[in-house]
Image (cartoon, helix red, strand yellow):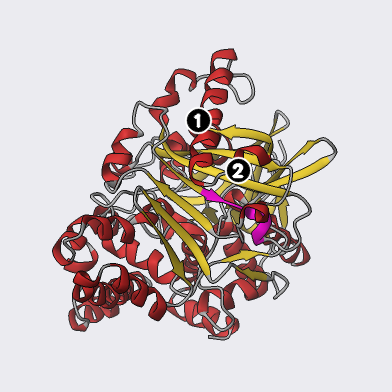
Amino acid sequence: MNTNNNYDAIIIGSGIGGLTTAVILTKIYKQKVLVLEKHFVPGGQTHEFMRVKNGKKYYWDVGVHYIGEMKKGVMSRKIFDFITDGNLKWNKMPHLFENFIYPDFNFRQPSNPIEFKKALIEKFPKEKQGIEQYFKDIKIAAKWFQSNASSKLMPGWMSFMYNIFKKDNSGLALSTTKDYLDNIIKDQKLKALLSTIWGDYGVPPSKSAFAMHAIVVRSYLYGGYFPVGGASAIAENMVPIIEKGGGKVITSCNVKEIIIENSKAKGVIVNKKNEEIKYFGKNIISDTGAYNTYFKLIPSEIDIPFRDEIKNAMSDFSTTTLYVGLKESAEKLGIKGENYWINTSYDHDMTYEQSKNSHEINSAFVSFPSLKNPESKSHTAELITFSHYDNFKKWKNTHWLKRGEDYNELKKEISTKLIDFVEKYIPGFKELVEYSELSTPLTLEYFTEWKKGSFYGIPATPERYKYKWISPKTPVKNLYLSGSDALSIGVVGAMMGGVFTVAAIKGIKGFMKIMKEVGS
C-alpha cells in the first residue's frame, strides 16, 4: 500500500466549492493541493457531457443554467476572475431574460430592478405598496444573510459583540417565503409570480426561508450570465492553476474513508481501479456535502453529535431533466436565449406536492444553453421538471445504464410527456427535437453522491440557518467542509463556501487577505 502521497491539503470532490478552495490555497498560500473526484471529469455540477447524433456533437451542462451578479466589478465576478486567472469569460443573457408563463398571463423580467418593479406595478396596480415593500425587504433579508455568514468567521468574542449591536432582522429573514408574501400581497397571481424561481433553490414557498429567496432574487436583479465555452469552461480554467502549483486533480477515484487519528484528520483512503491508496494532508476538505461527509466518510465510531439532525434535515426533492439536441436553432421560434418557467397553477406548494408519487408534468423550466454560449457549435435545450426520489425508488438498487427495460420505458414515457408539455407553450419546439436523453434523481444520486439526488444539499428552510454545522468547520480537527453546505446553495453560494473554507482554515485575517488579493 502506497503511503508516500503527502500534500498540504486534500480536497474530496471537484465541485465549484472544492476547486475554489484548492485554487485559493494554491495561489495565495502556495500550497500543494490534491483534489479527488469520483466522476471521470472534474467540475461536479459545473461539468458538461456530450453525445453524438448524425455526426453532430451536442453538449449540455448539468447544473449551470444561468448565474447572476457576474457584471465586472461585482464581488462574485471578482472572485471568479481570481480563481480562473481572468480567463473565464461571461455572456450576458437577453435583457428580458426570464419568461414566466401562467394559465392566463405571461411576464417577462427585465435585467434592471427599476424596470422590473415598474412592470410589476403596471400589471398589478392595486399591489403597488406591497411591491415596493418587497424590493426593500429583499435587500434587508439578503443583508441579514451576509452579516450572519460573516459573523461565523469572527472569533467568539467578536461575533458575540457583533450580534449584540447589529440590527436583528432574523424575523423577516427566517420567515417562510409564503408567510412573508401572505403578509404584504393579496393577489394570488402576484404571489405566484414573485415566487416562480423557487426552483432555483429547490424549496417551495411554504418551506423556504425568505432569506434564501431574497439572495436569489437579488442576484438576478441585473440579469443572468452564462460562461463562454459552456459550464465546463469553469473547471477547465481552474484545474491548470492547481496543477501549475504542484497539485493534482485525480478523477475516477472513490474516497472510501477519511483517516482520523487522535481526533485529527490525517488523510484519506481511496479506491482507484481496485487499488487501495492512502493520501495524507495537513488539512482534509470535503466538498461532498454534510450528509456524505458525516455519514459516509467519517468512521461511524467517531462521535458526531448532530448526525441525527443532518439525517432529519435531508429532502428527497430532486429533478428530472430531458437533455435535447435540436435540428436547428431555437431562434427560429423567436427565442433569444431567455429562460422559460412554465406553470399550470398559481399554487407552487401544490405543484411540489403533486410531483410526489406522480410522473405527470405540471410545470417545467426550459433552458437553451446553446443560445447562451456564443461558442456553441450545436443547438440544445434542457427541459427540467420537479421530481422526487421515491418516484424512482423501485430501481434504487440497480446500476446506471443497467436499470432494466421497465425503467427505460418509464423514461421514454416521461420524455414524451415533457416534450408535449413544452410544445403547448412553445409551438414548434417538438419539430426541432432530433435527440433526447432523460436524467432522473437516480442519475443525480449516482454521479453527485447527493443522497436521493437532492443536489441542493441541505434544504434552504428557515431551520437551515439555525444549524451550527452549516459551516466550514467540523468537530474533527483539520477537517473542513467546502461548497454549498459550508455556506449557501447555487454556483455562487458554493463558490463562496470555498472562500469561507479557506477563511476558516486561516482565520479572519485570512479572509481579509483573500479579499485583498481578489481586489475588493
Give the side of residue 148 with respect to residue 402, left or right: left
Relative image position of residue 302 (x, y in whole percent): 38, 41
On screen, residue 425 above or below 408: below
Q: Point out the frontmost of discs 1 and 2.
A: 2
Give the image location of residue 147, x and y in percent: 32, 75
Residue at the far right in the pictured view: 55
Q: Is residue 303 above or below residue 108?
A: above
Mark 2 is on which residue type?
Phe
Magenta region: 366-372
Viewer-nearest residue: 415 or 29: 415
Among the 4 quarters of the image, the one containing residue 142: bottom left
Q: Kindly tell me whether residue 473 is visible in this rendering.
A: yes
Left or right: 118 as drawn, with respect to 98:
left
Find residue 429 and name its label.
Answer: 2
Three-letter amino acid code of the residue under disc 1: Lys
For numbered disc 2, what is the local secondary structure? Answer: helix
**Label 1 packing within 10 angstroms: few (<14), some (14-19), many (20+):** some
**Picture coordinates of residue 258, whole percent (x, y):** 52, 43
Q: In this orientation, does residue 34 appear? A: no
Q: Which residue is mark 1?
A: 417
- Residue 425 placement (x, y as % from top left): 49, 45
Residue 408 tag number: none
Quadrant position of the N terminus in the picture = top right
Classify residue 69 as left or right of residue 62: left
In this view, 93 is above or below 189: below
Residue at left 50%, top 30%?
417
The answer to whether residue 152 is magenta is no
Find numbered disc 1 in the image and state the secondary structure of the residue it sits on.
Answer: helix
- Residue 255 in which image quadrant: top right
